[in-house]
Image: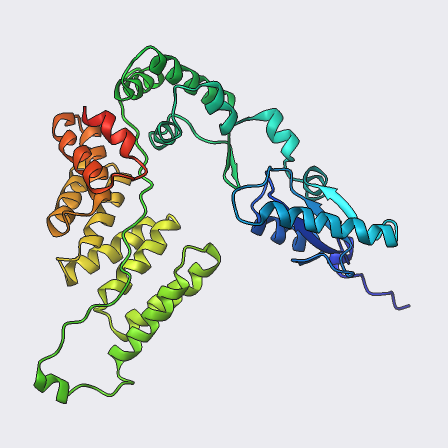
Amino acid sequence: MATAPSPPASQHTPLAGETVVFAGRMLALERREARALGEQLGAVVVDDVTAAVTVLVVGSAPPGGRPGERGEHGAKLARAKELNESKPGRVRILDEDAFCQLAGITTPSELRRLFQPECDLLERYGHLRPDQLRYLEKWGLVRPAHRAHGHTFYAFADVAVIRQADAELAAGTPFRAVVRNLLVSRSGQLALDFRIEAQPAKVLQLVRPDPPPLARLLEPHPDAPHSSAEQYFVTASVLDDGDPSHQAEAAAAYRRAIEADPSLVPALINLANIHYASDHIPEAQALYERAVTLDPDVFEAHFNLGNIFHDLGLLGEAQACYRTALKLNASYADAHFYLAVVLEKSGQSQEARNFWRSYQRLAPNGEWVGLAKEFAD
């Protein structure tokens, strides 16, 4: 006897057959993560509240600074309530806790119970600035337990470090000394564990030398390899916009550019950056080194290699790469900053001061300028 086919898996999911809209900022998830999770739960996710919508999920984070965000949140909620007035229960309104419970993930209420929000900690420990807290994170002294939508949460062990730093700053201790004291108290020795998370230097456009007049007469047809390589590079550069969902396509386009022109150094560097961002360090290192072999004067490859050597604990090699990058481009502020960091880690604080000062001069509004001033004193 024939049996009825099993229903599709989506029919067994909590939001199967539902049409879902998200409103407002979420605390436990980024919006794109929430959309993907809604689809995994069987829903069709749309952007606006229409007659087809059956579920509205309201985020629990306070509205941010994006123009229209508060109005967008309120308009969606008001529209859902209008639909429910015409037909009660037409749109099910869930708060973020309820949505997270459906998905089986940590709810905002649990996050607040288990961890301390960064904004609360900075208010409570007012002597510690936000940039100083980020610097403690770079040294590995605090490690956020959760991040979403610009909200950062810390566990109890991190709160103890933040409290100690605040107390020392309140007593007038220079921040440089605070960092060293925290490292000593954690490890019993001055074993600096700075974690570089530098943004790799990216090549934004191709620059080819103008050929001499005779070469112009002998230029290849537009469909020749160099032309194809440049077209692939331009396509890859558009895709390489920082959005993780575009990175695989960008990498594929860079590879096609390199296949068409194996000497296309900008494509090698930008493809290496994608590998580096994905923690594929050996692949990134090989591509940077290939770029340096082809063009020793490209500062981006030297700077990015410096970051890799630091990650590998090869501080001498990292120093050499940063110094070479600065010889090629003395105005690149990040190279001054990260060379100063490596010198500090190597116990060369006196020399590091010169590079802290250079960073201040080149990036007066830079992310780390406050710290650079303190370390330069």
Closer-to-camera residue (42/168): 168
In the image, taking residue 78 as reference, residue 245 lies left or right, namely left
Residue 352 visible somewhere in the drawing:
yes
In the image, taking residue 253 as reference, residue 285 lies left or right, namely left
In the image, taking residue 277 as reference, residue 314 lies left or right, namely left
Residue located at (29% from left, 74% from top): 229
Residue 91 visible somewhere in the drawing:
no
Q: In which quarter of the image is residue 163?
A: top left
Q: Residue furthest top?
A: 171
Q: Quadrant of residue 283?
A: bottom left
Q: How is the image coloured?
A: rainbow
Asked if residue 205 is positioned above or below residue 194 in the image, the reply reads below
Residue located at (40% from left, 64% from top): 250
On the image, the x and y values in percent for residue 320 come to: 13, 43
Closer-to-camera residue (70/285): 70
Closer-to-camera residue (359/364): 364
Residue located at (41% from left, 27% from top): 142
Work out which quarter of the rendered image holds the N terminus and state it. bottom right
Closer-to-camera residue (278/200): 200
On the image, the x and y values in percent for residue 159 come to: 47, 20
Work out which quarter of the rendered image holds the C terminus and state it. top left
On the image, the x and y values in percent for residue 303 come to: 21, 48
Q: Quadrant of residue 162?
A: top left
Asked if residue 112 is positioned above or below residue 33 in the image, the reply reads above
Count of numbered circles in the view: 0
Residue located at (17% from left, 86% from top): 219
Asked if residue 292 is positioned above or below residue 69 in the image, the reply reads below
